[in-house]
Amino acid sequence: MSDLALTPVTEIAVGITTALVAAWNAIRARHGEVPEAVITMATGGRESAVKLAHFSKNRWQAVKGGQTHHEVFVTAESLKGGAVAAMETLVHEAAHGLNVARGVDDCSASQYHNKAFKAAAIELGMTPKISVSAYDKKKYGFAFMVLGEEAMEAYADRIAVLDEAIQATRVPAFVPLGPRGCPECHGSQSWRQAMVTMAL
């Protein structure tokens, strides 16, 4: 007997994506400067072992008219972290989106998140994570942010919907080659190690 009785198996990904879209809309309802974006959820290929999500400027183009749209991409493998982590990932990417809308650079090519990212994340209700190693602080800057109490309360209903929607998560089919990118956008060291264990 299947343990996915709440939703037909063929509709699991649709339900998760719908919940992610609703969560992004909830962020935008509270913070109007956060831009619209195409919300997608799938495997990120080999990068899925080290990548949670990304915000990408003008990644989609309308078939009619040629208008461009930003993208928020969430890897299916990252959903194993649960609903709260998924909501934190979306707010993290919303901070990037907010800075894109304002024309502010908040992240280097090496994924160092600067004070502009920190300010945007705090504006959206995040707070610096307490337990961050000196190495990660030096390499990734202010990337490590979590939802504050007010934001947790504000998004409680969206988190509940995400929790209900995440009835399955994608199992990675490969072992990551090593650290790469922002540990919040692209997975912390402990998260990468967990993915290695899952893949073996």
Image (tube, helix red, strand yellow):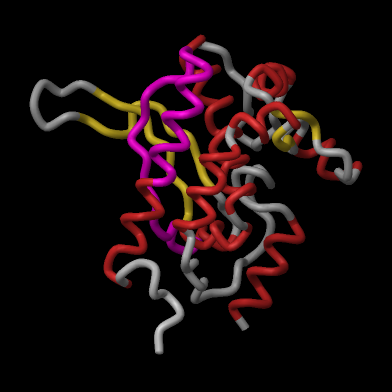
Residue occupying the point 27% across, 33% down? 60
Is residue 124 on the magenta stretch? no
Identify which residue, 190 or 8, lies in the foreground.
Answer: 8
Name the quadrant containing residue 92. Answer: top right
Residue occupying the point 58% across, 25% down? 95
Residue occupying the point 41% across, 37% down? 22
Identify which residue, 78 or 200, lies in the foreground.
Answer: 78
Residue occupying the point 81% across, 38% down? 129
Relative vertical location of residue 30 with respect to residue 84 in this rendering, above or below: above
View extreme (top): residue: 102
Is residue 42 on the magenta stretch? yes
Measured from the top left, where is residue 101 in percent x and y? 46, 14
Identify which residue, 140 or 149, lies in the foreground.
Answer: 149
Q: Is residue 59 left or right of residue 43?
A: left
Measured from the top left, where is residue 145 in percent x and y? 73, 35
Measured from the top left, where is residue 177 in percent x and y? 62, 66
Q: Is residue 113 left or right of residue 158?
A: right
Rendered-image quadrant of the C terminus:
bottom right
Q: Is residue 76 left or right of residue 7?
A: right
View extreme (right): residue: 134
Magenta residues, start to end: 19-46
Relative vertical location of residue 111 with respect to residue 81 in this rendering, above or below: above
Rendered-image quadrant of the N terminus:
bottom left
Relative vertical location of residue 171 with respect to residue 124 in this rendering, above or below: below
Q: Is residue 166 left or right of residue 153?
A: left
Measured from the top left, where is residue 160 in percent x and y? 55, 48
